Amino acid sequence: MVKIEPVRQIVSHLLVVLAVGLGGSPQLTEEAFDVASIRPVSAEPDGTMGIVVLPGGRFRAPFVTARELIEVAYSRLPTHVVGGPSWLDEAHFSIEARSSPGATRSQVRQMIRSLLGERFSLAVHEETRVLSGFTLSLARGDRLGPRLRRTPAVCTPFSYRGDVPAAPAPPAPPGFDELIDFDLERPRCPTLLLAGHWSVRGATLQFLAATLAAFLGQPVANHTELAGEFDADLTFASSVVNSDFDAPLTGGDGAPIRTAVTEQLGLRLNPSQVPVAVVVVDHVNRPTEN
């Protein structure tokens, strides 16, 4: 059975997909935040999730796990950070830090590495492992599914629940930055995520594969060999009930995700052993006091 992760985890993982590239190695760095505060939190606050950089060099992560910090700091997807104690995924922290206003996204990621090394005593190494995952391929020759199509010149509205148009996502506040420095080409149009539904506009199939990896919690290698930008609308079974949504989307088009990918997108998720460059956690402590 394919596991579909809770909405908060999926959203957090998608922010990491947007935030990181797939390259990079765990090298030491001299970059560091000017000041940083770390405190444990037990309840998710209202407002922004994920890891963001705000105007004036302010770094904010209001409800983040240590593993999520490692994912961003070392440019890895959630499935590509392995090892470590259970609290890496269970304990949440609120982090406020400040750097010079002119710091680049790459420099901020390096500052997160320094923070992890100094305050969490993190030690890691990189290696290639073969992990259980999927390859993404075309299911019907060169024919796409009814909900996967080439992107037109102008971004089109979202559609969900029987192709009823949905309002586009609100724009980010001025100066808002989600550490977006993605080696994979980021979609040029908005993305919509609901319980059991995902719509994307102007995305490569490599980006689609990375997002499916976040949904599934397993690596997905793109073997479609299709270039260019695509629009996709995917509705799949989800047992998630979250306060942000009235109910999960189940029944009707709410098929198991692998079935939905084939029937709606014309793609196939094939179980496979996938070689992945992973970051291995060798040593980590709970963070030191402020």
Image (cartoon, grey):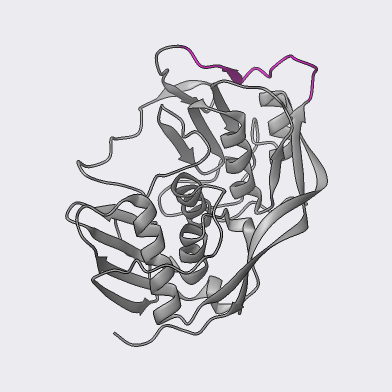
Residue in view at x 46 percent, y 44 percent: 18
Q: Which residues are magenta?
A: 139-152
Residue in view at x 52 percent, y 21 percent: 163
Residue 192 versus residue 98: which sits nearer the camera?
98
Residue 205 versus residue 139: which sits nearer the camera?
205
- Give coordinates of residue 192: x percent, y percent: 45, 35
Majority secondary structure of magenta residues: loop
Q: Is 255 contained in the magenta span?
A: no
Residue 137 versus residue 163: which sits nearer the camera?
137
Residue 232 image-quadrant placement? top right
Residue in view at x 38 percent, y 87 percent: 288
Kindly give the residue lying farthest to the bottom in the view shown: 289
- Give coordinates of residue 108: x percent, y percent: 35, 58
Residue in view at x 50 percent, y 85 percent: 285
- Give coordinates of residue 157: x percent, y percent: 41, 20
Q: Is 269 located above or below residue 93 in the figure? A: above
- Image-based side of 277 in relation to 149, left or right: right
Asked if residue 256 shows in the view, the reply is no
- Image-based side of 111 in relation to 215, left or right: left
User: How many marks can you see?
Assistant: 0
Residue 36 image-quadrant placement? bottom left
- Image-based side of 271 in relation to 288, left or right: right
Asked if residue 91 shows in the view, the reply is yes
Q: Is 99 located above or below residue 163 in the figure? A: below
- Image-based side of 155 in relation to 220, left or right: left
Q: Is 141 contained in the magenta span?
A: yes
